[in-house]
Amino acid sequence: MTTNQTNSPLFALDIGTRSVVGLLLQQEEETFSLLDSYTKEHDERAMLDGQIHDVPSVARVIEMIKQKLEEKHGPLKKVCVAAAGRSLKTIRAKVSINIDAKPMLTRDDLLHLELSAVQQAQYELANERTDSSTDYYCVGYSVLAIYLTMNQLEA
């Protein structure tokens, strides 16, 4: 890696809700080519709704990515950062299914329950929105709990 400003690679970080991506790019006239990249998921729920909730945890992930790239390419002194912060919304939804006629539950039954809850959350979001200029997309979901009662499975 050269220290010449015009030839030195561009180090970029994308700090996302689920992971951090480090990129090393080389400018070639009007375009950039990818020299190297390293991705690491957050160790725990350090980010929520696009905001950092555990700064030390996110900092450790960033430091690890920087070290991995520096091992191959030498010191990286400057960085461009894109941090999560898009307009994200968290919706909690609950659904239940009747399991009376099912003596044994399968993985597909649980997946059906999860995806039904995701669809319910999307429905609730669509009904609460008054601004039609912003579209929301499901970028991930977490199952918080699954409850089994006499004849109902609820998530």
Image: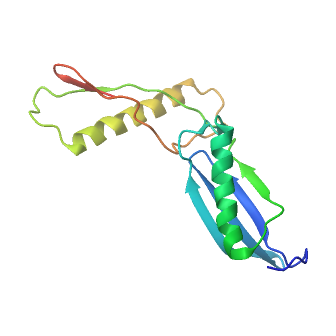
Tell me which residue sits at (10%, 30%) in the image. 101
Tell me which residue sits at (46%, 39%) in the image. 141
Q: Is residue 95 above or below residue 134?
A: above
Pick the front one: 52 or 84: 52
**Residue 64 image-quadrant placement:** bottom right
**Residue 145 image-quadrant placement:** top left
**Image quadrant occupied by the N terminus:** bottom right
Q: Position of residue 128 (x, y in %)?
A: 56, 24
Pick the front one: 6 or 114: 6
Locate residue 95 relative to residue 83 in the image: left or right.
left
Q: Position of residue 74 (x, y in %)?
A: 76, 73
Pick the front one: 148 or 39: 39
Tell me which residue sits at (23%, 44%) in the image. 107
**Image quadrant occupied by the C terminus:** top left
Taking the image as drawn, is residue 47 in sight? yes
**Residue 90 image-quadrant placement:** top right
Locate residue 103 relative to residue 43 in the image: left or right.
left
Q: Is residue 92 above or below residue 80?
A: above
Q: Is residue 4 above or below residue 85?
A: below
Q: Position of residue 130 (x, y in %)?
A: 63, 26
Tell me which residue sits at (66%, 73%) in the image. 36
Number of labelled discs? 0
